[in-house]
Amino acid sequence: MSKFNKEQKIEIYRKWKDEKISISQLSKAYKMNLANLDYMLRLIDMHGTNILNTRKRVYSKKFKEQTIEPLYLGLKAYPLIYVATSPNLIYFVFIYSLQI
């Protein structure tokens, strides 16, 4: 999938929302991964186009260690506020917890 700018993402969203073009058709037309496109469209639908102004978060090593430390120590209740910030971080914590 190539990178799309904000205007292109809004155009794709409008085609899905207003013109009722299916996600699978848009996925083929724009050569996007179906799951990524579905996630993007639902995110815009839920939060509006202003969500496209947010930047990608970069997590420090210290933050990641603090997030997974309770799992490493065997604690079942770890702060969900950490894992709710990004699907990638949720996946990372999930995979890490399976390896313990």
Image (tube, rainbow, N blue to C red):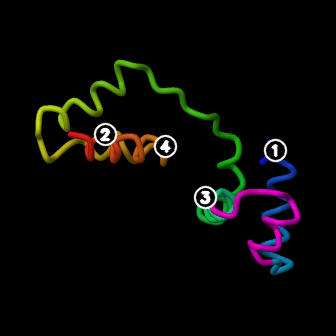
The residue wearing badge 4 is 88
Between disc 2 and disc 3, whose residue precedes?
Answer: 3
Q: CA distance from mark 4 to mark 3?
A: 19 Å
Residues packed near mark 1 inside 10 Å, few (<14), some (14 to 19) or many (20 plus): few
Quarter of the rendering containing residue 65: top left
Q: CA distance from mark 2 to mark 3?
A: 30 Å
The amino acid type found where label 3 is placed reads: His
In the rendered view, does 19 fall on the left or right side of 80?
right
Residues packed near mark 2 inside 10 Å, few (<14), some (14 to 19) or many (20 plus): few
The residue mark sitting in front, 4 or 3, is 4
Label 1 secondary element: loop
In the rendered view, does 62 fall on the left or right side of 69?
right
Between disc 2 and disc 1, whose residue precedes?
Answer: 1
Quarter of the rendering containing residue 68: top left
Residue 86 screen position, x and y as percent: 48, 44
The front one of 88 and 95 is: 95
The amino acid type found where label 4 is placed reads: Asn
Q: CA distance from mark 1 to mark 3?
A: 23 Å
Mark drawn on residue 96? 2
Mark drawn on residue 47? 3
The residue wearing badge 1 is 2
| Quadrant position of the C terminus in the picture | top left
Q: CA distance from mark 4 to mark 2?
A: 12 Å
| Residue 76 against residue 18 in the figure, above or below | above
Quarter of the rendering containing residue 72: top left
